[in-house]
Image (cartoon, rainbow, N blue to C red):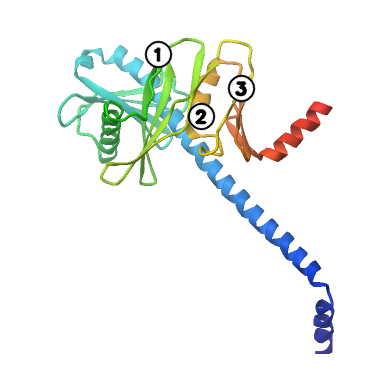
């Protein structure tokens, strides 16, 4: 007991300002670790979502061309199409103009998106529950976009909207990405997110970027950058990742930086991996590199 008593007596003799300082350092470390874990989790989710959007767009890009080539006799009956991931494959579903749409054809791609190995199924059938939900939220998004009373959506010359419905973990979303009709260019920005409830009704519409930027894909540039202003995502967005993955295949891009007030997101276009740094750490690192 005397040993324990002496230890407490020693602790009691430590100046309180030192105790407070140690506690202060502990709290800083605790909250810093908590923030780091939160950012890591957020970054992982963004990358997963961005790659899902990419797979959907790839299936739509190649699926629409393949459908017109192989199933052209049904083109007058097409009401539209959408794509979604199903395990390790991506499916592009073409549906009819009927009041209650049916499938006219489904084209399935593996991870290579090689049109020669794509599987074409011309079976006409009712939409599955998942396919019907994707159809519904896509249709309601187009209705909102074309509404004369909704002014959130901006339209630019030589561009069009790509509507990407996505359902994951019972969360229903539709992303709108602006694509250019000009060769040798890619667009980042003018993208939107619509969130839906279980009944496929829109509960939120938001603009992900405040502007639109063009990036050349046919020059010698090896990377690019853009800013996220206060009030927007502190990190790269899933739509940014989708666009970078789609167009880096046609460019010399090696990396892309998304700079916000507190963080810098660095997307590696060669490995399709994301690195997130605190802005102050990134600035110091760049300062050292510039001095060297």
Percent position of residue 268, x then y: 61, 29
Which numbered disc covers residue 224?
3
- Nearest to N terminus: mark 1 or mark 3: 1
Asked whether, in this view, residue 140 is left or right of residue 15, the answer is: left
Residue at x-position 65% and y-position 53%? 33
Q: CA distance from mark 3 to mark 2?
A: 12 Å
**Relative depth, front residue between 7 and 61:** 7
Q: Nearer the viewer, mark 1 or mark 3?
A: 1
* Residue holding disc 1: 157
Residue at x-position 54% and y-position 42%? 44
Work out which quarter of the rendered image holds the N terminus and state it. Answer: bottom right
Question: Disc 2 on helix, strand or loop?
Answer: helix
Percent position of residue 290, x then y: 79, 26
* Residue holding disc 2: 240
Q: Residues within 10 Å of mark 3 (few under 14, many from 20)?
A: few
**Relative depth, front residue between 102 and 24:** 24
Residue at x-position 29% and y-position 25%? 81
């Amino acid at each position: 007991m005397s040993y324990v008593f002496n230890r407490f007596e020693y602790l009691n003799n430590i100046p309180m300002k030192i105790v407070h300082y140690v506690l202060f350092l502990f709290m800083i470390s605790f909250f810093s670790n908590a923030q780091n874990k939160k950012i890591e989790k957020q970054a992982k989710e963004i990358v997963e979502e961005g790659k899902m959007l990419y797979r959907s767009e790839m299936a739509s890009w190649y699926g629409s061309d393949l459908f017109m080539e192989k199933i052209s006799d049904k083109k007058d009956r097409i009401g539209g199409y959408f794509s979604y991931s199903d395990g390790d494959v991506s499916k592009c579903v073409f549906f009819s103009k009927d009041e209650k749409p049916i499938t006219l054809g489904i084209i399935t791609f593996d991870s290579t998106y090689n049109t020669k190995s794509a599987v074409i199924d011309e079976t006409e059938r009712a939409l599955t529950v998942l396919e019907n939900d994707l159809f519904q939220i896509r249709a309601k998004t187009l209705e909102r976009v074309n509404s004369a009373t909704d002014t959130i959506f901006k339209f630019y010359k030589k561009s069009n909207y790509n509507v990407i419905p996505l359902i994951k973990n019972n969360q229903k979303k539709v992303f709108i990405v602006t694509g250019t009709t000009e060769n040798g260019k890619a667009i980042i920005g003018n993208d939107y997110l619509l969130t839906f409830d279980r009944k496929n009704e829109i509960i939120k519409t938001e603009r992900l970027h405040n502007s639109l930027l063009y990036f050349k894909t046919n020059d010698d540039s090896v990377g690019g950058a853009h800013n996220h202003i206060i009030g927007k995502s502190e990190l790269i967005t899933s739509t940014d990742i989708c666009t970078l993955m789609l167009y880096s295949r046609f460019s010399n891009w090696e990396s892309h930086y998304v700079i916000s007030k507190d963080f810098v997101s660095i997307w590696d276009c060669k490995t399709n991996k994301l690195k997130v740094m605190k802005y102050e750490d990134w600035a110091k690192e760049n300062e050292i590199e510039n001095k060297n």
